[in-house]
Amino acid sequence: MQPYLIEAIRTPRGKGNAKGRLNDVKPVNLLRCLFDEMKVRAPHATVNTDEVILGCVSQLGDQGGNIAQTACLYADWQPKGSGTTVNSFCTSALTALGLASAKISAQMGDLFAVGGVESMSRVPLMSDKGALFEDPEVSGKVPYVPNGVVADFFATKNGLSRNDLDEYAVRSHQRAASATDQGFFQRSLVPIADTQGHLLIDRDELIRPGSSPESLKKLPPLFAELGSKGANERLLKHCPEVLAIEHMHHAGCAPGIVDGASLALVGSANAAKRLNLPLRARIRAQSFKRGPAIEALTGGLIATEDALKQCGLTPNDIDLWEFNEGFAGIVMHCAGQLGIDHDRLNVNGGGIAMGHAMGATGINLLSTLVDELERRNLNTGVVAISGAAGIGAAIVVDREC
């Protein structure tokens, strides 16, 4: 069976710190709000869903205990099968989508709820203290290089300046602010209220409309110290034509730490007919190829090339791209390699402006992409994400349903 996107929604993203508007909202409640909204949009999905598969990177504390199973039952959904929580770093929600799509194609079910959650204020990044980050023997053997250092490496290798990175970041904020003001996100955005029904947030909290190259010049580089602890040496040995790494990335051109969740319904044409809902997009190709671990954030590029090859397309055939803004230098590198112009890339801003709620990002981007394809009456789009240690994922969708 052919898998299709039936519906996709997301929460606004709140600042991932104690002052963020979603800090007091438990991750399970972020998901419950989306399950409740999906129940309104697709009332028959609650008992017709074959399985719930959600991404979450830091699976401990509030996010432990198989939050996919917990959240759907907490929201009074009664799927036919189990809930499963997956972690493939930044690509986790796309992995959830890929698993569901494969099961649909193999006729192991015809309706799945997929998405993800990450409350980075309540469960901080790397708080699971995994061996990849904490054990020098493991990180040296992999080898693991922190993402920010890799971003600085590729910016240096490609001859990008600090001003180039800052201009990209400013454009992300300007586009996100404009899209918000014009209501482009309203189709998929679900406002979040507290337990008394008082509105907490109805737009992405991190966007800075007044951001400028001048304001970003004040921010210090973040990753020089990390680089000096062996990461620079590993990368320079790997690529000896680069003589030294210039550390340029800072908080303003890095993906924002945020809280957020996403949820989608993926199914067959028959499932959509049972739900009396239109098919929004065909899932045409998916790839989970990886890049070299030492180059960390190039996996999305490798996966994109593979996904395009699967369906006989070139980058020029794609109307719109959502390439996760995991550091300005990385998305600029990947766009340059693929020949993507700015008019088709992250046209409503991205993770630099709105944040990167890791477990939720894949469906966040997919909802944004399909909304914009529909708004512009365009056909084909790509979502691509790179993760730590070379992980990559890409999906090609079109509206030929």
Image (cartoon, rainbow, N blue to C red):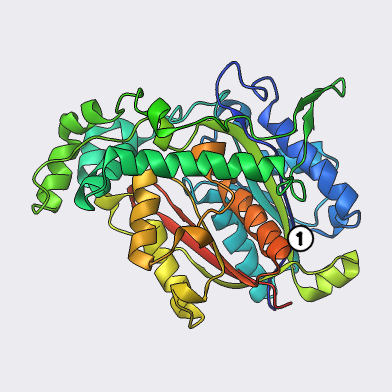
Instruction: Give the camera-side residue of 182 and 48.
Output: 182
Circle 1: residue type: Asp
Query: Splitting the image into 4 quarters, where does residue 129 fall?
Result: top left
Q: Residue 286 in the image: x percent, y percent? A: 53, 68
Q: Residue 131 in the image: x percent, y percent? A: 34, 36
Badge 1 density bin: few <14, some 14–19, many ≥20, Cα 10 Å:
many
Q: Residue 336 in the image: x percent, y percent? A: 34, 61
Quadrant including the C terminus: bottom right
Q: Residue at x 45, y 32 (%)?
A: 212
Q: Residue at x 60, y 55 (%)?
A: 96
Asked whether residue 113 appears in the rendered view, the answer is yes
Q: On the rendered structure, is 149 left or right of 79?
A: left
Q: Residue furthest bottom?
A: 312
Asked whether residue 289 appears in the rendered view, the answer is no
Image vertical order of residue 229 relative to residue 316, above or below = above
Q: On the rendered structure, is 82 left or right of 163?
A: right
Q: Residue at x 57, y 46 (%)?
A: 361
Q: Residue 122 in the image: x percent, y percent? A: 58, 23
